[in-house]
Amino acid sequence: MGNKRIVITGGPGTGKTVLISSLEENGFYCFHEVIRTMTLDALNGKQVDELLVNPIDFVDDAKSFNDELINARLKHFNNGKNIDKKHLFYDRGLPDVIAYMNYFKQPIEERYNDLCLKNRYDEVLILPPWKDIYVQDNERMENFEQACGIHQYLEKTYIDLGYKPIEVPFGTIENRLQFVVDLIEKFGE
């Protein structure tokens, strides 16, 4: 199928999920983020220290957690082959796993890079840190400064993999949605 795969990425709390939901409400096919469910499952009732920001710090096996995460994102990527829609949106992509691992100084297996190089998205939209809308919660443990650092790692990772991320400007959800819709029209048919 001739669909375009478009990743929506950015640091925590930048409005990605709201934008994905809005795209979906407007008839676009969207793959949702998997990390929130994985984080809740990993917490399994544990109390989180307020200084703890990395889900890897409270999982029993960091390698298995990262493997599960990249495999879930790869499954989304592969499922896109069976979706008969012109545009497919992904709430985070395979490279996000590498960016987070780099940010948290975790070892990265070469197969992670290989997966990112073999399974390419057509476009990357990145939402910048936005202090006015940032909220911490049970699954988003990072403070705003840490979210900004993660954003930088995400941007660098995508650039290092040969992408040219397009920044989605601040604005109402309607404005951001319109920006994305206008942009995909420019991408061509």
Image (cartoon, rainbow, N blue to C red):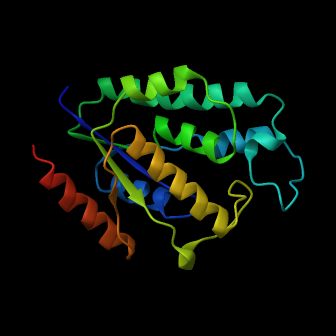
* Image coords of residue 186 (percent x, y): 13, 54
* Image coords of residue 161 (percent x, y): 39, 37
Horizontally, residue 94 falls left or right of residue 60, namely left
Q: Image height check: is 105 above or below 110?
A: below
Picture quarter with the N terminus:
top left
* Image coords of residue 168 (percent x, y): 35, 64
Q: Nearer the viewer, residue 22 or 178?
A: 178
Picture quarter with the C terminus:
top left
Furthest residue toward bottom? 132
Choose top left, top right, bottom left or bottom right for residue 58.
Answer: top right
Q: Residue at x 27, y 39 (%)?
A: 122
Q: Residue at x 29, y 56 (%)?
A: 26
Q: Nearer the viewer, residue 43 or 101?
A: 101
Horizontally, residue 89 falls left or right of residue 148, namely left
Q: How many marks?
A: 0
Horizontally, residue 124 falls left or right of residue 53, namely left
* Image coords of residue 18 (percent x, y): 46, 61
Q: Nearer the viewer, residue 74 or 98?
A: 98
Horizontally, residue 177 falls left or right of residue 99, namely left
On the question of residue 31 being in view, the answer is no
Q: Nearer the viewer, residue 81 or 130?
A: 130
Q: Image height check: is 183 above or below 144?
A: above
On the question of residue 24 being in view, the answer is yes
Choose top left, top right, bottom left or bottom right for residue 97.
Answer: top right
Q: Residue at x 68, y 57 (%)?
A: 140
Q: Residue at x 65, y 31 (%)?
A: 66
Furthest residue toward left? 189
